[in-house]
Amino acid sequence: MSGRDHPVDADGEISPADISSPQQRSPSVVPEEAGANPPYVHKVEVPPKQNLFNEFMYTFKETFFHNDPLRHFKDQPKSKKLMLGIQSVFPVIEWGRKYNLKMLRGDLIAGLTIASLCIPQDIGYAKLASLDPKYGLYSSFVPPLVYACMGSSKDIAIGPVAVVSLLLGTLLRAEIDPSTNPNEYLRLAFTSTFFAGVTQAALGFFRLGFLIDFLSHAAIVGFMGGAAITITLQQLKGFLGINKFTKKTDIIAVLRSVFSSAHHGWNWQTILISASFLIFLLVSKFIGKKNKKLFWIPAIAPLISVIISTFLVYITRADKKGVQIVKHLDKGLNPSSLRLIYFSGEYLLKGCRIGVVSGMVALTEAVAIGRTFAAMKDYQIDGNKEMVALGAMNVIGSMTSCYVSTGSFSRSAVNFMAGCQTAVSNIIMSIVVLLTLLFLTPLFKYTPNAILAAIIINAVIPLIDVNAAVLIFKIDKLDFVACMGAFFGVIFVSVEIGLLIAVAISFAKILLQVTRPRTAILGKIPGTSVYRNINQYPEATRVPGVLTIRVDSAIYFSNSNYVRERIQRWLTDEEEMMTTTSLVRIQCLIIEMSPVTDIDTSGIHALEDLYKSLRKRDIQLVLANPGPAVIHKLHVSHFADMLGYDKIYLTVAQAVDSCSPKLSDEV
């Protein structure tokens, strides 16, 4: 229904007395005129008034309980609800009842395979965190058992990982020197692990898992790639047999340390061992990629490398010739470390800070891995439950001499390819680690550090995802800036600075998109009533005297002034162009509001200012298809009354039709 169906006042506006309120008229039809049968014209309806409590509860539910985790409890007896509640915390109770020998066969093979991979990796990762190698093995015994009972992923393999080990070690060394104060360093490591678990469990319990989504995929790609290069550089100490090595992680300090010791600090026997076995590991990985059925070759290659290199060092006594070895590795199960955790004192806050940072990074990696493999097997995991499970295992791990554990992508991939069926593969892996701790640790005495360096380098190479970076560059240049910012921050400054840059750029991108939303001029696709962006569809035609603009975002306080000023700038540009081409001046401005999901008070004030400005220039403001939340707020704020309900249309085509007849009369 257009304004020409009503009498107008002296200023050409519809008289308010002639506009009935939505409650007094039906906004979906045109009232009958004498002797006419008018067609039905659909108008934008004002939704029923929402109860404030119901609206709040809906928003609360969609924010924290969007996947409706309590739906299984509906219409169930109390005993059943109790059982379902226990199962939600311990999923092992549910799938354990359906477990059979066929599943055990797949889990047994997978568990033995990932155990052969994790044992040498754990020893190396512990050294990466500046901890005794036994703590790496401890961290692959208790945490996987806890996760097997509480986790919902069938494929994720739990244990220490390279990136978290590097991050934790870097942050810990910034507070305590492990060579001069090993006991305090160890205590701070356990304290950090405890608070990492508390952070993870709290995020899951309070349904705050969406916070980790603020770290964009591009930032993670850059951070992981930079961390992989930093880890590789750190391994040059063991790879080349250097005794005195920098404690810094940036590329300049590491390379300076490497080349300054080139004449007297390198050991050729060490280089021969590390280079030979690194080539062996890379070749085995290549074979596994070429033939998926041979996945077990790269999986057992690290353990084979450890066995052979240890034997060679033992029989040649290469340790007497400068080849550095693991030396003594304690036998026995994880001792209790509860009394070692700082619950007071100066290191409490430091441990909390380090734990929060390392816990968030570990959480991001684990949830990403869990979702990836769940999608491949077409099952669902609850991210918040995963966080509780990961948090619980790290809290318990901190009390049993473990440091921060999470999901390992390399081991999870092997676990998946080996045919794992359930989390029992983690239990099998833990049992193998247990037997190693009880009986086999003395055999690692002559294991050269060079082979551990080669294993770690081989493990982190896949973290440098060049293809992903190229794709990010093609898709979104701003994402690429975030990726490169995190990458260069890690390799040129430090791991924590790289992570900070990744987070900062991710938030900056969000703020930029919120504060500077896209707008577009629309034109009509020939032969249709569809209006689209004229830059995307060059064949779209403009209606003389009408400017149609689409706003591609909610209008909030953060962008309301920008939206108003951008629309006015579009209008000024159009008027200047019309002046030079002697075309019909703009008399009607239509704002397509389909993408505007919401609007606040600042947004409404911006529309009011725009409306008043247009009136002074004798230009009519028209809105097309505002959503329910928007039209409700326009109605409550009385802006719809100011504008006129007859200037709010269901489609752009209707809005253009309401303007163009008057314009055609003037042309």
Image: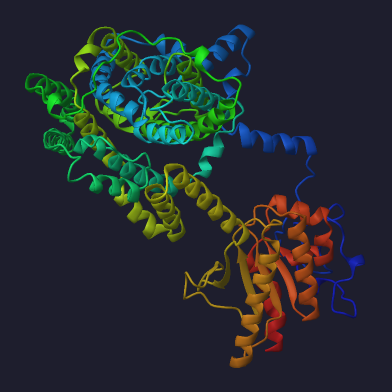
Give the number of marks. 0
Residue 636 is left or right of residue 386, and the answer is right
Report whether 489 appears left or right of 425: right
Percent across and percent down for residue 515 are: 62, 59
**Picture coordinates of residue 535 (x, y %)?**
49, 72
Q: Is residue 115 visible?
A: yes
Question: Residue placed farthest to the right in the image?
Answer: 17
Q: Nearer the viewer, residue 558 or 437?
A: 437
Give x and y (percent) for residue 17.
92, 66
Its colouring scheme is rainbow
Side (left or right) of 258 relative to 478: left
Q: Is residue 660 placed above or below 264 in the rendered structure?
A: below
Quadrant containing the N terminus in the rendered view: bottom right
Front residue of 118 and 413: 118
Taking the image as shown, residue 429 lies to the left or right of residue 558, namely left
The structure residue drawn at horizontal position 44% and vertical position 22%, both measured from the top left corner, is 186
Residue at left offset 41%, top offset 56%: 480
Residue 29 seen anywhere in this rendered image of the structure: no
Quarter of the image where one finds residue 123: top left
Q: Quadrant of the C terminus?
A: bottom right
Which residue is more in the foreground, 14 or 226? 226
User: Residue at (38%, 46%) from the top-left corner?
Assistant: 221
- Residue 582, by quadrant, is bottom right
Find residue 555 and report its horizontal and vertical position in percent: 68, 58
